[in-house]
């Protein structure tokens, strides 16, 4: 690794500018060079930062934490939001994830968290319990399913350099929980190419992603895998009519108003997989605790 | 009766699914029927189901699974998840 002594400045004026963070990571990992100091300036044109974008920033900071000092500058209201979700803690070189989980009640959010297979149940169950209090008698099965499937996918397929990061927040005005899960791994198209799956255009990220979301398509990274996790997530999003954005490689899959659409990833130089899902509380069923007679 | 909640620590991971697999396997070997209780259980991920139910179906077939395992104390949402999972084996019958 070679140090560059000047300060590097990244200016975020519109959402697609978050791509610059991926571009820098590519520079860091491939060219093995880095700036001692990096300033991220989020301009006043950015009115709010979405959960998925929060994770892009956090991953960036975590990936560079050993070598770079990252400072984030933003408008006062975004700054306050960042303080609430403790984003500056990730910029601290001595940052260590708290062993205890506490919801951020002032903004109805769970803290940003590095989640492993070993501790995912603790995170999911705590978060579900917290949001259940907000959502009353609505059945949050989809909440558990989204997190469990997406975190398992990271560890089954991604080879992420920094594990999986998660963030979720309830937005009262739209009565919706937004959930984001991300990694800096080889991406879904990358894992499909690595497995040399036949019958698809391996060099076409869009065709890889379309293949991955179909039920029963699996690269069998574990013998028992059946390719149902991602399709399960898509099905829940279609039923719930909550928007879903899945970015991987240079491709994207969206679920909008229950319809699945694919296209080009808006972020150039994208690394890993990033997914944001809206869980629309109004569209969930009421909890039904009655036991039923199960018939095959 | 096997109460899943008492057999596993969570219903999300492959490793916990393997514990349920191990608890159920003797019943498949003997051919005895067993009630499997879903009481007080978090939703089941496909990884958990793959390593438990999926492995048993791969080994003994879906028809034997239906003969041996009787899901009980199950809510509508768990039943829907289980049914959807078992439907994925439909083309293998």
Image: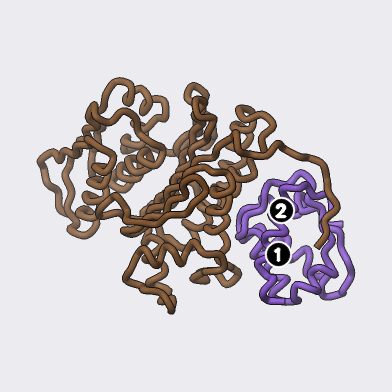
Residue at horizontal 72%, vertical 59%? B83
Quadrant of res A283: top right
Tell me if residue B49 comes above or below residue A278 in the rendering: below
Q: Where does the image place residue B37, in percent across and percent down from the top left?
A: 82, 53
Which mark identifies residue B4? none
In the picture, which quadrant includes the C terminus of chain A? Answer: bottom right
Viewer-closest of A227 and B33: A227
Dot 1 falls on a residue whose secondary structure is helix
Same chain, marks 2 and 1? yes
What is the letter of the brown chain?
Answer: A
Q: Chain of mark 1?
A: B
The answer to whether residue A12 is visible is yes
Q: Where does the image place residue B43, in percent across and percent down from the top left?
A: 67, 49
Q: Chain of mark 2?
A: B
Quadrant of res A231: bottom right
Q: Which circle's residue, 2 or 1, is located before the other in the chain? A: 2
Residue at horizontal 57%, vertical 44%? A240
What is the letter of the purple chain?
Answer: B
In the picture, which quadrant includes the N terminus of chain A? Answer: bottom left
Give how far apart the Cα atoms at labels 2 and 1 are. Answer: 10 Å
Tell me if residue A239 comes above or below residue B34 in the rendering: above
Mark 1 burial class by Cα count in 10 Å: few <14, some 14-19, many 20+? some
Viewer-closest of B32 and A208: A208
Left or right relative to A60: residue A24: left
Dot 2 falls on a residue whose secondary structure is helix
The answer to whether residue A114 is visible is no
Residue at horizontal 51%, vertical 52%? A151
Left or right relative to A74: residue A230: right
According to the picture, the residue beneath numbered tag 2 turns out to be B80
According to the picture, the residue beneath numbered tag 1 turns out to be B86
């Amino acid at each position: 690794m070679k140090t560059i002594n000047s300060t590097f400045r990244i200016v975020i004026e519109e959402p697609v500018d978050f791509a610059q963070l991926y571009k820098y990571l590519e520079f860091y990992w491939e060219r093995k060079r880095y700036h001692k100091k990096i300033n991220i300036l989020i301009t006043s044109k950015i009115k709010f930062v979405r959960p998925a974008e929060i994770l892009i920033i956090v991953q960036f900071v975590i990936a560079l934490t050993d070598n770079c000092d990252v400072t984030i500058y933003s408008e006062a209201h975004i700054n306050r939001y960042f303080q609430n979700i403790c984003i500056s803690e990730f910029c601290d070189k001595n940052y260590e994830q708290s062993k205890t989980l506490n919801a951020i009640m002032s903004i109805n959010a769970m803290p940003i968290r590095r989640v492993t297979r070993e501790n995912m149940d603790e995170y999911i169950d705590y978060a579900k319990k917290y949001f259940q209090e907000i959502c009353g008698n609505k059945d949050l099965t989809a909440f558990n399913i989204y997190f469990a499937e997406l975190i398992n996918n990271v560890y089954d397929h991604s080879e992420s350099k920094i594990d999986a990061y998660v963030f979720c927040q309830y937005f009262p005005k739209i009565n919706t929980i937004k959930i984001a899960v991300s990694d800096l791994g080889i991406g879904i198209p990358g894992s499909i190419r690595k497995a040399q799956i036949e019958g698809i255009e391996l060099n076409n990220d869009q065709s890889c992603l379309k293949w991955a979301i179909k039920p029963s398509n699996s690269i069998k990274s574990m013998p028992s895998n059946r390719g149902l996790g991602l399709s399960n997530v898509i099905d829940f999003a279609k039923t719930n009519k909550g928007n879903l954005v899945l970015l991987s490689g240079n491709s994207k899959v969206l679920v909008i108003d229950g319809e699945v659409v694919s296209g080009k990833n808006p972020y150039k130089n994208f690394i890993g997989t990033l997914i944001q899902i809206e869980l629309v509380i109004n569209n969930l069923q009421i909890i039904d605790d009655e036991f039923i007679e199960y018939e095959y | 009766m096997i109460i899943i909640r008492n057999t596993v620590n969570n219903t999300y991971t492959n490793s916990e699914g393997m514990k349920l697999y191990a608890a159920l396997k003797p019943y498949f070997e003997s051919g005895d029927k067993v009630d499997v209780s879903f009481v007080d259980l978090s939703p089941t991920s496909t990884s958990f189901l793959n390593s438990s139910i999926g492995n048993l179906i791969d080994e003994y077939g879906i028809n034997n699974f239906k003969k041996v395992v009787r899901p009980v104390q199950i809510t509508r949402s768990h039943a829907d998840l289980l049914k959807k999972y078992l439907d994925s084996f439909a083309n293998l019958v």
